[in-house]
Image (cartoon, rainbow, N blue to C red):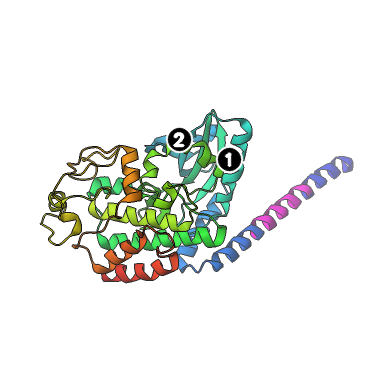
Amino acid sequence: KSLNRKPLCRLICLVHSIHFSVCVCVRTNLEALQKKLEELELDEQQKKRLEAFLTQKQKVGELKDDDFEKICELGAGNGGVVFKVLHRPSGFIMARKLIHLEIKPAIRNQIIRELQVLHECNSPYIVGFYGAFYSDGEISICMENMDGGSLDQCLKKAGKIPEQILGKVSIAVIKGLSYLREKHKIMHRDVKPSNILVNSRGEIKLCDFGVSGQLIDSMANSFVGTRSYMSPERLQGTHYSVQSDIWSMGLSLVEMAIGRFPIPPPDAKELEQIFGQPLEGDPSACDASPKPRPPGRPGSSYGPDSRPPMAIFELLDYIVNEPPPKLPSIFGTEFQDFVNKCLVKNPAERADLKQLMVGTIMFSQSS
């Protein structure tokens, strides 16, 4: 009996040892996370929400295709399809983006490695990341589920987004871009309404930023719509920086404010249809001739749009060679000034993130 007792005692000791090690490891990880959160200058509510997500994330473990149950489709685009899913082992609801790629195993593995950087991107203005994996010819990126959807979807339902809300959107986008740049030396590269998500708690977060150079290269042929939001310097193939993201944000703000993609600008008749009144003195309202609309922009989605379709190369040429869009005078002067600073064609003269943060606070308070 004494001989049988020894292996049992050793087993009990081993279990206690493992349990102690796991507890120490979890406590160490949480302490490291709390230290990082303190550096972000968050308010108490933001800190609690981020801590709750990161604690929840530690329970998820390795992600596998068989562990997911599809609930519904959240959205689809050139880059892939996003589903709302249940992760059975944890019971958590997630958003799972599936990107179909015909690529070699070495490139696939590199993409998965590069996406792991997202584990370090923890901010109230960045969509939470659970993990990424490859299965059956598809890269899966599993993220926090934002139950309000994208601002692109909100725009299609509402027609246009009020200036006061766009003030809050601007603050969140600038803080998200600043976090990516200052903490991780990352540019977003794809700022547009469909990559700005909201939830029922009123949070506004960025998603789909370019952490994986290999993924960007592998999907280069898919970004026809994305090119519409690219800055002039990027379309011309010259060096670009986070200033390019600022242009994309400015263009997105005008689109959400007037309810349609703003290049080329709507004419006087369209502005009157959009706002229900004639807008006198607006530069965009002077020319009543119908202008072509950008490719892939059906009028039913973004309000009345009588413009004939425009080829993608015509649109890109317009962005590079024609004056940038402006907000109509119906909007506040602070908001107009803010957008004008974003949409300066020369990136060296375009406002930077710090300058814009001051401007954002001004127009969000005045609206």
Q: Residue at x 33, y 54 (%)?
A: 251
Instruction: State whether residue 58 appears in this view.
Output: no
Q: Where's residue 342, x and y in %?
A: 36, 61
Q: Position of residue 108 (x, y in %)?
A: 59, 35
Examine the rendering and report whether any part of residue 248 can be seen: yes
Mark 2 against mark 1, which lies toward the viewer? 2
Q: Which residue carries the number 2 mark?
A: 221
Task: Measure the C-alpha gap from mark 2 to mark 1.
Answer: 17 Å
Instruction: Provide the secondary structure element on which disc 1 rests.
Output: helix
Residue that numbered label 1 is attached to: 111
Q: Position of residue 31 (x, y in %)?
A: 62, 63
Residue positioned most to the left: 277
- In this view, the residue in front, 8 or 194, is 194
Going by the picture, which residue comes out furthest to the front? 321
Predominant secondary structure, magenta span:
helix
Task: Decide whether residue 150 is among the magenta residues.
Answer: no
- 2 lies above or below 345: above
Q: In the rendered structure, does residue 16 fall within the stretch colored magenta?
A: yes
Q: Can you tell which quarter of the image residue 134 is in?
A: top right
Rate crowding at label 2 as few (under 14), some (14 to 19) or many (20 or more) other CA atoms within 10 Å: few
Q: Amino acid at mark 1?
A: Ile
- Occupied quadrant, residue 295: top left
In this view, the residue in front, 36 or 262, is 262
Q: Residue at x 19, y 43 (%)?
A: 305
